[in-house]
Image (tube, rainbow, N blue to C red):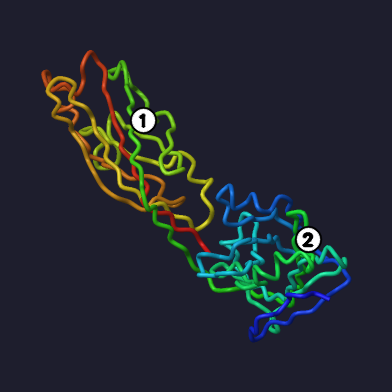
């Protein structure tokens, strides 16, 4: 008989014991006390599949502090996989979460009475107060023996349906500016329509500078045209947009009076570049003493800061 297993009264939660192990996944955690000693507030399992979807278990041995849980362990089922946040379906599922009584070999099982709806904006369901710390650590209950505990999950997908399209904007809290310098030698001998700089990375995105030595669009024949572009726009997920501010600059190597343009822009697969047709006139660029061309060398700089990414739901 378990001496200290007193369940808290929580509406809508069914508790039972089962001799059958969980159908879909089991997590065994050894040296559990070392999680806290190593400042790990939670443990996330690997992905597993059930009902055609990927899931994972997330366990808080000292309670989910983000939800102000005290004196309890917390356990959740989370829809996982690389595209979980972009899922275009609502998945209705009934799930059961298990905790092994290692003394008796059976499982404490918690289940909500109603099915739960998993979707792009709500990927996790479970139990803030799965079990009190007192009951969990009491040796006679068998849930924590030799600093080892065993959890599990069963998921039964009842139905699914498509949802409306949407998007999720994630702003970057501490955005970091990246500067890329491009030195172009033998500038007067450039004869192609445009040239690309080496690819560089800012905000986990690949970028390049594009230079049109004889102009583009309304600047053809009269201006140098300069652009910032996504280096691989086709690699973006459908519907994704990247919000960045950037400065493009041609250095005056003599007087340090640089020609520059600054703007912010939403980059995407359909709008992969932004810049200026008429960045600088060809006459001004080549004017003696201005320093934009020194020994037939031109130096172009890009400063790029990614502030946000919007992905389709």
What residue lies at 36% left-to-right and 51% top-to-bottom?
A: 307
What residue lies at 53% left-to-right and 56% top-to-bottom?
A: 238
Can you tell which mark lies on residue 78? none
Q: Find disc 2 in the rendering and name its residue.
A: 25
Counting from the top left corner in percent of width and height, residue 269 is at 46, 50
What residue lies at 76% left-to-right and 68% top-to-bottom?
A: 98
User: Is 30 situated above or below 155?
Assistant: above
Q: Find disc 1 in the rendering and name its residue.
A: 193
Q: Are marks 1 and 2 in contact (CB under 8 Å)?
A: no
Q: CA distance from mark 1 to mark 2?
A: 58 Å
User: Is 219 situated above or below 48?
Assistant: above
- Tell me the SS state at disc 2: strand
User: Is 223 situated above or below 268?
Assistant: above
**209 and 96: which one is in front?**
96
Counting from the top left corner in percent of width and height, residue 154 is at 77, 69
Counting from the top left corner in percent of width and height, residue 252 is at 17, 25
């Amino acid at each position: 008989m378990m001496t200290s297993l007193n369940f808290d009264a929580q509406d809508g939660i069914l508790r039972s014991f089962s001799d059958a192990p969980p159908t879909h996944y089991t997590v065994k955690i050894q040296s559990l006390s070392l999680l806290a000693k190593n400042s790990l507030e939670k443990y996330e399992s690997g992905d597993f599949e059930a009902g055609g979807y990927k899931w994972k278990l997330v366990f808080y041995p000292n309670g989910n502090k983000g939800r102000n849980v005290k004196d309890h362990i917390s356990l959740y089922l989370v829809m996982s996989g690389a595209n979980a946040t972009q899922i275009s379906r609502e998945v209705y599922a009934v799930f059961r979460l298990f905790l092994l009584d290692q003394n008796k070999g059976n499982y404490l099982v918690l289940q909500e009475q109603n099915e739960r709806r998993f979707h792009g904006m709500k990927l996790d369901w479970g139990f803030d107060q799965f079990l009190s710390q007192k009951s969990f650590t009491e040796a006679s209950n068998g849930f924590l023996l030799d600093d080892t505990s065993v959890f599990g999950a069963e998921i039964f997908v009842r139905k699914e349906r498509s949802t409306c399209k949407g998007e999720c904007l994630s702003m970057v809290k501490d955005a970091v500016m990246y500067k890329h310098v491009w030195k172009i030698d033998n500038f007067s001998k450039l004869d192609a329509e445009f040239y690309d700089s080496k690819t560089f990375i800012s905000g986990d995105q690949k970028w390049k500078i594009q230079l049109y030595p004889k102009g583009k669009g309304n600047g053809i024949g009269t201006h140098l045209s300069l652009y910032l572009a996504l280096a691989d726009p086709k690699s973006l997920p459908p519907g994704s947009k990247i919000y960045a501010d950037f400065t493009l600059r041609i250095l005056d190597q003599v007087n340090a009076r640089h020609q520059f343009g600054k703007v912010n822009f939403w980059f995407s697969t359909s709008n992969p570049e932004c810049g200026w047709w008429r960045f600088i006139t060809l006459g001004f660029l080549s004017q003696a003493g201005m320093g934009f061309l020194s020994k037939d060398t031109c130096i172009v700089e890009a400063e790029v800061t990614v502030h946000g990414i919007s992905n389709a739901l």
